[in-house]
Amino acid sequence: MRPTMKDVAAEAGVALKTVSRVVNNEPGVNAATADRVRAAIERLGYSRNESARVLRQGRTSSIGLVIEDVGDPFYSGLSRAVEDVAIRHGSLVLSGSSAEEPARERELVLTFCARRVDGLIVVPAGADHSYLRSELAAGTPAVFVDRPAGPGLDVDTVLCDNRGGARMATTHLLAHGHRRVAFLGDSPTIFTAGERERGYREALGDLVDERLISMAHPALDRVRADLDRMLGMDDPPTALFTGNGRLTMTVLRALAGRRMALIGFDDFELADLLSPGVSVVAQDSAGLGRVSAELLFRRIGGGGGPAERVQLPVTLIPRGSGELPPEALRSP
């Protein structure tokens, strides 16, 4: 059996209330008695019952975080930033991956709510979040990050400038002489993928060729097939814009030595060490996590006001691949 406060009180020869005051750092205990209680705690290996404490306070000192994939470098940066903010507020982070499955997202969120988390940060996988209405009405604040909530849910949202970043990347390729720019994106049902496609289209205008747009799951076989089809056209693309970091790395594998202009959305490790270095539109995953967590803890602390929608800027990092001229296309 784990030692209790009663055991500590008996060991130290003091009243139960004295032990409670020492454990909770309350005043009213002289130094010698407090030292005796702490020595008894150490001898017995006593630890405070956090469950009982949070029940008395009405909070669990924990938040729930639902992301797409805990193993993805982008989301690991976001998660770490959320955790850093939570630690400053004396809170723990319970996290899980939705794997882009709406049913799994719903299950995770409701599981966290059943554990009475103080708030939620959600990267949504689906578009229907009506299941959250009762939790929000009960006073559990939520912040949606990277993608907005579905219609009818008025919650705080923190996004990056996906459309503006895609427009910036495509305009950069146009400025370097490219007129045949292909876009490989993720599934069009994903908010970020759709926004990046729109930015790409806005930059190209009348130069858009539907045959140079592919949006689906970023599997290597699919990307390789799409590239082979595009590069086999009579008027092939001379530049590529990829919609996320995983797609960029998949394209680099699929190109198999073929050299052409490339800009990817999302930075990734070692991008600067390739030859040429990979030009990217970098978004601040840590910034997304930090801003969303700070906003959530403000709500947990009683901050009121209408739901906020925050959009963080992105940055174009030219490293060489996005600056290659149209004539750079060549086979291995």
Image: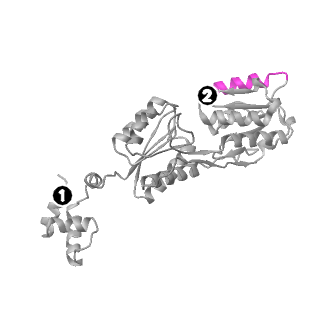
Separation of marks 1 and 2 at Cα, in angstroms: 55 Å
**Quarter of the C terminus within the rendering:** top right
For residue 247, side relative to residue 97 (left or right): right
Residue closest to the eye, 290 or 96: 290
| Majority secondary structure in the magenta region | helix
Q: Amino acid at mark 2?
A: Ala
The residue labelled by disc 2 is: 219
Mark 1 neighbour density, 10 Å: few (under 14) some (14–19) many (20 or more): some
Q: Give the magenta part as a residue range.
A: 220-234
Q: Report which residue position mark 1 lands on.
A: 4
Q: Nearer the viewer, mark 1 or mark 2?
A: 1
Residue sitting at x 19%, y 75%: 33
Q: What percent of the width, then of the height, locates residue 254? A: 69, 30
Residue 255, position as x, y percentages in the image: 73, 31
Horizontally, residue 185 falls left or right of residue 52, namely right
Task: Tell which circle, 1 or 2, labels the residue nearer the N-terminal end.
Answer: 1
Camera sees residue 259? no
